[in-house]
Image (spheres, rainbow, N blue to C red):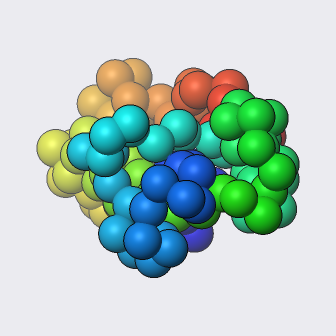
Amino acid sequence: HRIPAYLAIPRDSHDGDPSNISESLDPPPTWVVGRTEEEALSRASSALSLPPSEILLKQDDDVLDTWFSSGLFPLICFNWPHEDPRESGLYPLSVLETGQDIIF
């Protein structure tokens, strides 16, 4: 499950292959999010003031891996999966806080 974050660029400013889109392009691509690719394309259309047919999107591949790994780090420090009495007080896992632009 990847986070639905996409890099968006005008189709005419690129070779047409979405796999070649990167943040190092000039001008840089615009980040958009959406529950579906169609929703992200609609948001990109608004952000870039272009019709959807003139926009290329590339979904970010690495977002979830980074978040998932950083969430496991504290558990591993507490000898997870074995129970550790320190875990409940120092890392209760009862609240998840993240960017509102990503959680729908």
Q: Residue at x 57, y 69 (%)?
A: 1
* Relative image position of residue 43 (x, y in whole percent): 78, 41
Quadrant of the image containing the C terminus: top right
- Toward the viewer: 86 or 59? 59
Q: Is residue 27 visible?
A: yes
Q: Is residue 84 visible?
A: no
Q: Residue at x 28, y 30 (%)?
A: 86
Q: Residue at x 74, y 51 (%)?
A: 40
User: For residue 28, which quarter of the picture?
Assistant: top left
Question: Looking at the picture, does residue 28 appear above or below residue 38?
Answer: above
User: For residue 69, which quarter of the picture?
Assistant: bottom left
- Toward the viewer: 3 or 43? 43
| Left or right of 79 on screen, residue 94 | right
* Relative image position of residue 29 (x, y in whole percent): 46, 42
* Relative image position of residue 83 (x, y in whole percent): 33, 52
* Relative image position of residue 26 (x, y in whole percent): 32, 40
| Left or right of 85 on screen, residue 54 | right
| Left or right of 29 on screen, residue 73 | left
